[in-house]
Image (tube, helix red, strand yellow):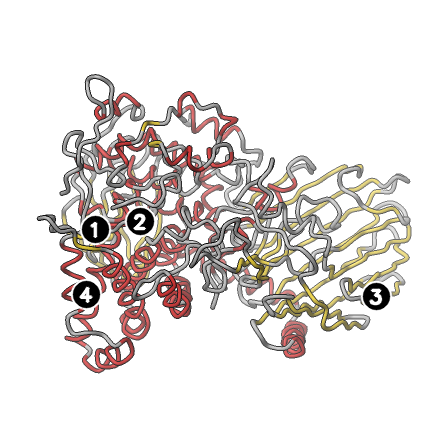
Amino acid sequence: MIRRTADEQRSMDRLRFPAEPWRLVEAEFSAEDLGVTESLFAVGNGYLGMRGNVEEGRESHSHGTFVNGFHETWPIRHAEEAYGFAKVGQTIVNAPDTKVIRLYVDDEPLLLPVADLVDYERALDLRDGVLRREILWRTPSGKRVKVASERMVSFVERHLGVMTFEVTLLDADGPVAISSQILNRQDGQDEYHVPAASLGEGFDPRKAEAFAGRVLQPQTRWGDDERLVLSYRCTNSGMTLAVAADHRLETVDEWDVRTQVDDDLAKHVFRVDAKAGHTIRLTKVVTYHTSRGVPTRELVDRCRRTLDRVRAGGIEEQFAHQRTWLDDFWARSDVEIAGRPEIQQAVRWNLFQLAQATARAEGSGVPAKGLTGSGYGGHYFWDTEIYVLPFLTYTSPRYARNALRFRYQMLDAARRRAKELSQKGALFPWRTINGEEASAYYAAGTAQYHIDADISFALVQYVRATGDTDFLRREGVDILVETARMWEDLGFWRANGDDNFHIHGVTGPDEYTTVVNDNLFTNVMARFNLRAAAFVVDRIREDYPEDYTRLVDRLSLGVHETTEWTRAADHMSIPYADGIGIHPQDSHFLEREIWDLAATPVTKRPLLLHYHPLVIYRYQVLKQADVVLALFLQGQHFSAEQKLADFEYYDPLTTGDSTLSGVVQSIVAAEVGYHELALEYFVSSLLVDLANLHDNAADGVHVASAGGTWSALAFGFGGMRDHDGVLSFDPRLPQGWEALTFRVQWNGSRLRVTVRPDELELVAETGEGAKVVVRGEQVTVAADEPAVVALDGQGPVRPGRPSLRALSGNRRDDGTLITATVPHS
């Protein structure tokens, strides 16, 4: 019998999908949660994404076809302007929809909410990346019609989508019409949920902004009996898009086709005199090409070349290539949890979402919702570097390199932003698509300077794991230098005997505490950034003198800059409160009153939708892990006792209003001994979308949370760490789990890591093997035999969860808060 905690069971109870290890299956149609299922059954490849809308195109929560980076711009109108505020907003554009294939039998349309469905199944197959649906429909006249469809966005052909649609009248002849369309919706109702300026009831900053007026200006329209073409230019951004579709109808029955092409609609209507038992098969191949400035006529030519190439090779070849690609992906990325079928399915679904969000995102970032919805406007955040890149670095390093190179391509814009904010170096935007800051609310957005250090951390992590010094010397070092310059310029040295280096006026990851002094996470990560930049520059000077000369010329690097970076890092102010033995989140955090979360009704969560920011900012209450995230990323700088004390203090203050928080709390809970709590946080993060735990999965998949679930497995339960270039393991397998297996790419070798209750097994699946550390002992993993290390227990075990009683230490005996000056370690 599988033993679950109460919170774990409650999360599981919200699942409505049978626990198949390689498929997500919807066994019956429901119109009540269309938004959620449209996100869960989306298909994409990192460049092109299609929401899981039904083929008929009429029953939907929000239609969605998205191309990564294809966006419109709009002026941000602030109620009160100030210098340096973001001026231009950016929002992903809902591209013309090619998913629409409408069916009529006896001129009666198939409409799922009212149809007599004798049988229904829709399944996303994680092994071949194909969304399949099979329906047995009884028409109003009593005819039984079998309808089967497939939908795939190719991982191999970046610009390609493939759909098939089969219709079989089982027991009677009849007229059949199939209307296959390219539809550009202009009413705005489906594409964008609420205006950004709508601050009344229903306002949610996590949703996309609305546009006023027409976004896509028609440029080209063309069609013949097999191919349809439309192209557009965005009104403000000037970005261009072309979309084309090829059709092939196969049937032994008589048929004809009529073609209609308008500015916003191109369609083929196939009319068939269908005979009982004869299958009608429509194959629809679509392609999208976009550009920041190439004329649409060139994009139309690209579409034609793509379709011609696919036509020559055949559709079955595309499905075969897709399966081969995914076989390779799963060989290096799969995580296996023995004896936990629901968790196994959910883990694989989350990993598949990471592939869909990143694999072909070449030249673009990773949107917070991938390409499954318009939530967060299609923006790229620091989520990518901290939550998604670890998975890519350790399983698919080429994709990690692409994401980092995208940041490098944004470097000039980051330099301009730093100058606008009166800083040297570069300051990367908190949220963006085109490289410019798109956050209209600076306190919880632009002030998150830590993104510079997050990008630098991901860069160094990638280079350590892969040994890719070529990228580091040519491009990566520029990011490290310019971000280090920003930190050295932003911070300051306080006089009067205080020899610490301080950073004031910033916001950490916790968006419920903004514009503070000496935010611990920011300072710890800035320290890492400064040291890494100095180390890399010095190493290039010693080992690659020609590259160093080019670096000096390229960046006008001063001879003493690395010395100043090291000095600032060595004297970085790290808040620590001796009286209660914890690290304050910032220099004044402990002076605030504690928010009574236990007395806050569920109807008032998340807090940001029910309380003015000024109300929230006055309290000790966290949207997401802040100090705890620092304990994970820079854990080598904190003692075990400090980690436990900090975790016990901050965990009861953390609302979990952010999906970024649970995975981090799970990792650190496992490390400090709260094993049941670690599992609860992991399961709730794993099911954020599958069980719609935050009630906003309709806006798209939470890609960062998906990445975080891999981290919770590898870093949390697997106990993996990569500090200072040493790969180590200190496992914390949840009670009742038989085994956990995951893969790690490390300096050219792929290691298979299997954690069991009493042992850790390491196997070099590819490459020559590696040297790792397991609970303080060095272990050699050779290519010819497994290394098995006996495990003596799972470390400290603490029952339950931290209690608010642990917070009493920050008050005096008379109940007043401790507000004494906070000393520094």
Whole-Å distance between the Cαs marked 2 and 3?
59 Å
* Dot 3: element: strand
Crowding around mark 3 (Cα neighbors within 10 Å: few <14, some 14 to 19, many 20+) is: some
For residue 488, side relative to residue 343 (left or right): left
- Image quadrant containing the C terminus: top left
**Looking at the picture, which amino acid does disc 4 mark?**
Ala
Q: Residue at x 66, y 47 (%)?
A: 62
Whole-Å distance between the Cαs marked 3 and 4?
63 Å
Q: Which residue is mark 3?
A: 260
Is 279 located above or below residue 660 in the figure? below
Residue 699 marker: none
Residue 748 seen in the figure = no
Is 632 located above or below residue 407 in the figure? above
- Image quadrant containing the N terminus: top left
Q: Which residue is mark 1?
A: 502
Q: Which residue is mark 4?
A: 534
**Looking at the picture, which amino acid does disc 2 mark?**
Gly
